[in-house]
Amino acid sequence: MRAAVRHSAAGTSAAALLLTTLAAAPAGGTPGGPGVFGPLSRPAAELRGTAVAAARAGSAGIEFGRCSEAQDMPGSMQCGTVSVPLDYAQPDGRQIKLTVSRVRATHRDPYNSKRKVPRQGALVYNPGGPGASGFHFPLIGLLPEWKRLAAAYDLVGYAPRGVGRSAPLSCQDPKGYFKGPSPAPTHPSESYKRERIAQAKAYARGCAERSGSALRHFHSLNNARDLDVLRAALGESRLTFMGASYGTYFGALYATLFPSHVRRMVFDSPVNPDPERIWYRNNLAQSVAFEDRWADFREWIARHDEVYRLGNTPAKVLRSYERARAGLAAEPAGGKVGPGQLQGAFLQAGYYDDYWPLRAEALSAYLKGDPQLLVDVAGPVPEAAGEAENTAAVYSAVECNDAPWPRDWKVWDRDNTRLARVAPFETWDNVWANLPCAYWPAPQQRALDVRTGPGELPPLLILAAERDAAAPYEGALELHRRLAGSVLVTERDAGSHGVAGGSNPCVNAHLEAYLLQGRVPSRRAACEGRPEPVPSG
């Protein structure tokens, strides 16, 4: 989605796992390698290939050492690589290397310096995306909220396939990635739609031209398989994992495919795993949720009208925003911030309410005649173009490969024209981000049915904010229904995307109790929302 597979009753035996994998086969799957009774189907070959790759990685381990100069960070972070097959149906074929980072468990109790904390293994983290890197995650152990977890666990991050140095994907020249200033019409004209369709087709072609036949192998099922190889390389018989946002999706795939390999899993801000919603319908739901969160932001600004002078009602704040859009369309701020950049900056505020004060201050200053702060928060950063282009390429590859998308533009146009009448804030921007999937040159799979039965898994912890826009709350409810034995902790009346290890002590207490002691609350629990941001100025 700008960022998210269904349920099977498979058990933990090898035969049941094979049935689960067969159910996840892409339409038109091709034979894999030879089997005892003849050629293996592709899903059976991928299952076998995962076991082969994991056994190989378990024997080799990861040779951790000093990080390269470009990657080095404060603290004791070490770096290494693990090899995984590009195509799990061909485990002895082309290999790609995933970059991995680690900070070893400190064993130091932050509240009792005399107590030595026993190590519990590795805690592997993925921040989502698709396209985001968890490479710098181990450094989070330097923060006070994470020191107890850092005492007990080796904190492990990695860049998933396609991301950063892990066989990086690219779909266009990064030099042309940041195009600004740009428009962002909430009700685009037919000519503008034709222009964006042409751009989407060109982008999809670029992905194919730059990656060739390898492009089809960048998807969520392979991300889940990679996770099992990483588990083995770390020397862990069972995985302890925390995934946020999209990371919860392939974490759920992992739990479905490898239930006997699960120790503990935290799903932070889950996306909806229903295969009928991956990914097209999830993006429609996301556009609706961002409209609600945009309304929350405007209400907050209105309550602080004495600071920002943007209007004392949400409607007046919206008029101020639209006035800025019109002004930027006529004369971009700093020559590079137009309506598109303004919309992008305020979309970020829909993800994290910590961004609210600075965004409101920038809008206020712009309307008072000073555009510099808006340029600072919304302007493109050329130095980040390479990383941003890579993130977008992986995002497109994974989402477009994961599941079928409508191939007829008329479907997109009909659904989103209707939606934009009630949710104009993000609808069309979301369309343009995902439209290459309508013209995708690689095969599109069927999404796996995420589902586990009673007793197949140890307890799993799900954390979610009620008003999360990037991953609407119904996704957490759906994942909770599908993973038997999971527990759901809800942050009430809050909307920041990603709640683990943040500013809510109640959420953090549940997280620590689970990861440190294996304790979970009853089937459902709730925490009061974190305080609203304090206005700047």
Image (cartoon, grey):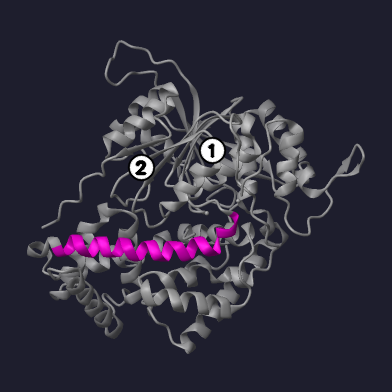
**Foreground residue, 41 or 494?**
494
Q: Examine the rendering and report whether any part of residue 233 can be seen.
A: no
Question: The C terminus appears in which quarter of the rendering?
Answer: bottom left
Q: Is residue 118 left or right of residue 299?
A: right
Q: Position of residue 504 (x, y in %)?
A: 27, 39
Task: Please report whichever mark, 1 or 2, sits nearer to the chain's N-terminal start.
Answer: 1
Q: Is residue 219 left or right of residue 132?
A: right
Q: Is residue 215 magenta?
A: no
Element class at badge 2: strand
Alpha-carbon span between mark 1 and mark 2: 31 Å
Q: Examine the rendering and report whether any part of residue 458 can be seen.
A: yes
Q: Position of residue 100 (x, y in %)?
A: 53, 38
Which SS type dominates the magenta stretch?
A: helix
Task: Identify the residue at horizontal 28%, vertical 50% (top origin).
Answer: 493
Above or below for 117 versus 85:
above
Task: Identify the residue at horizontal 53%, vertical 47% (top origin).
Answer: 249
What is the number of callouts on the image?
A: 2
Q: Position of residue 189 (x, y in %)?
A: 44, 87
Q: Which residue is mark 2?
A: 490
Classify residue 146 by image quadrant: top left
Residue found farthest to the bottom: 191
- Report crowding for label 2: few under 14, some 14 to 19, many 20 or more residues within 10 A (C-alpha): many
Q: Name the amino acid type tagged 1.
A: Val
Q: Name the amino acid type tagged 2.
A: Thr
Classify residue 381 by image quadrant: bottom left
Q: Which residues are magenta?
A: 275-302
Q: Which mark is residue 100?
A: 1
